Image: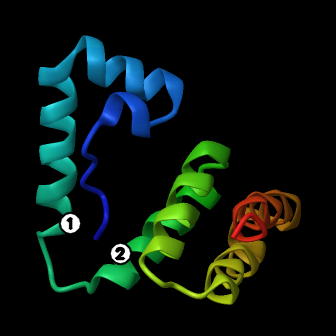
Amino acid sequence: MADELEDPATELPATAGTLAEEYPDVWDAYADLGEACAESGPIDDETKRLVKLGMAVAAQSEGAVHSHTRRALEEDVPPETLRQVAVLAIPTAGFPQAMAALSWITDITEEE
């Protein structure tokens, strides 16, 4: 997966980048935890990315939806697959929440 960042301070949203810059040990531990979680089982990289996107949708985190959408596109996940994640959220997260997430995904997929 493309979760490795060369320069977290410039590649992350402002608050996370500031945290990475001001507390590098905390950022490194957080990144190590993420890597350990990703390597803890047999799920393939694309499925992991879609699961992370789905969790961001359910959490209603616009920034995380944007981030995972960008990363998924970099990993050659088709935009229609990403949009389906939002559609799948309708019965679980609710129609308004899923539509918000769909708009956030579209923000990024239409940039490409």
Q: Which quadrant would residue 93 be assigned to in this image?
A: bottom right
Residue in the foreground of this view, choosing between 4 and 88? 4
Judge whether 71 appears above or below 32 on screen.
below
Q: Is residue 22 left or right of residue 82?
A: left
- Residue at 21 percent of width and 37 percent of height: 30
**Marks 1/2: CA–CA distance:** 8 Å
Quadrant for the N terminus in the image? bottom left
Residue type at the position of mark 2: Lys
Mark 1 in CB contact with mark 2 (< 8 angstroms): yes
Q: Residues within 10 Å of mark 2 (few under 14, many from 20)?
A: some
* Figure check: 22 above or below 103: above
Question: Could you say whether the residue bearing mark 1 is in a helix, strand or loop?
Answer: helix
Q: Residue furthest top?
A: 22
Which residue is painted at 40% across and 26% down in the image?
Answer: 17
| 53 versus 18 height, above or below | below
> Going 28% across and 18% down the picture, which residue do you hit?
21
Front-most of 82 and 93?
Answer: 82
**Mark positioned earlier in the residue sequence (1 or 2):** 1
Q: Which numbered circle lies on residue 48?
A: 2
Q: Nearer the viewer, residue 93 or 3?
A: 3
Q: Does 82 sit left or right of 99 as displayed?
A: left
Q: Secondary structure at mark 2?
A: helix
Residue 22 point in image, percent of width and height: 27, 11
**Residue 38 numbered tag:** 1
Q: Quadrant of residue 97?
A: bottom right
In the displayed structure, does residue 95 sit left or right of residue 91? Answer: right
